[in-house]
Image: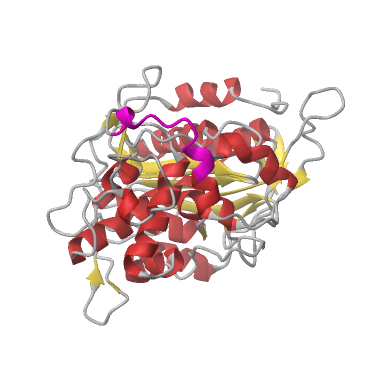
Amino acid sequence: MSTITGVSMPIRSGLRRAAAAVAGALVVALVLAGCSADREVEIDVPAQVEGGFPAETQAELEAAVAFAMAATGSTGAIVGVWSPWSGSWVAGVGNADVDDAFRVADLTRPMICDVLYSMVDEGVVSFDDDVRDYVPSVAGLEGVTLGMLCDGTSGLGSYVSVLQQDQLALLTRTWNPNELAAYGTVGYDPSTAGAAWRDSDTGYVLLGTALQNAKNSSAAVLLEDDVFAPLGLSATSLPGRVAAPAGDPVLRGLLSLPGEDGALNCAEPRDVTELSASFGFTDSGVVSTIADVGRYTQALATGALLPEGIDRFDDPQVVAAELPSWLTTDGGAFQAGSLIGQFGSVPGYITAAFADPVTGMTVAVVLNNSAATDLVGAYLAWELASIASKAPAASGQTAPDAGLPWTAEQYHDAIAAAAVCPLPAS
């Protein structure tokens, strides 16, 4: 047992094979066989030193995760933190093991954009193609292009906000992507196409549907061929439409719901592990493990999968006026200072993953209770990144000069403000 900030919980680092898989994934020239014999993908980041962080840094990381678990009512979390010059920490915390599968939520978005980039490079589609050319069943989308769907500038809204209660009432229901898109296009104004970024789950479901139709292949196969296989992500997939857990072994997914008094019942959350990935589809349906998520996030940050001549962040958009100016978005991903990644939530899980393309520092985390805002995932990732960015250099290494435009304390306080369950005493 390890006592963290007054909360006693087991820290399970997993088997040596898991640690070795992670260490091997995060090296200077990660060369893995792709979906074809002549394709290789390199992730160009500094080599990861062996071993863990110094005791003081490790204690700070553990305390941050424990605090976020308490704030969200999570009984388990899986975390991966890699600072190539200092050390790494990859662990299951509480009721979690490092090999457990989970739902990656919005990290699916840059993945389906990667498929778009590949298909553009092949000449199968163009960024300027009208979505109606491939999904004629959805009316009223004049001027909406495939590129807009990927960048989040189509102006389309959210089906999740409309159907969330139905999803929770019918976790095992199979959803048709055209039905989801129909809810997200109600009241759509074509004049907003291309005007500004909007958080649109509808857009990414439509993008996946369009790419399926354009290549006459399932989204699961497209993602496997263009993203998962080239990076060697053997534990990552877009599941079928039949309701099932995210994998085996699995991190149990929980959701605290209001009790009779209206307050969240943090002591007895609902188990929502088994559900149909069809509700998230190519917006948030992918399942994975922390090792694979760390590997993909470094590929995302460095542009390892991008064909020559394609820049994911050629036109970054402001996320919201009330959020920091250093947070922008494009190509299905976020730029947070020097970090690139994504965050989000689905029933049972809050996830976030970010990496620095220059230093190689990478943070990935999942919490197993989705009752709180999905921003808590980003807050925790940024808190961990701030701690890890200041980790002292191991023997023979040099710590990078690059800093982040926030402090660990800032996002520790943000998690406290967003807490939906009782926090531990100081």
Q: Is residue 189 magenta?
A: yes
Camera-nearest residue between 140 and 92: 140
Camera-nearest residue between 119 and 301: 119
Q: Which residue lies furthest to the top in this view?
A: 322
> Residue visible at 69% across and 26% down?
423
Q: Is residue 286 left or right of residue 43?
A: right
Residue 205: x and y in percent read 45, 50
Question: Which corner quadrant of the image does residue 217 belong to?
Answer: bottom left
Q: Does the magenta stretch include residue 17?
A: no
Question: Which corner quadrant of the image does residue 125 belong to?
Answer: bottom left
Q: What stretch is highlighted in magenta?
A: 182-193
| Residue 363 in view, yes or no | yes
Residue 414: x and y in percent read 52, 23
> Residue visible at 19% across and 62% down?
121
> Residue visible at 64% across and 39% down?
164
Residue 163: x and y in percent read 62, 40
Residue 182: x and y in percent read 51, 43
Camera-nearest residue between 221 and 256: 221
Against 161, is 324 above or below?
A: above
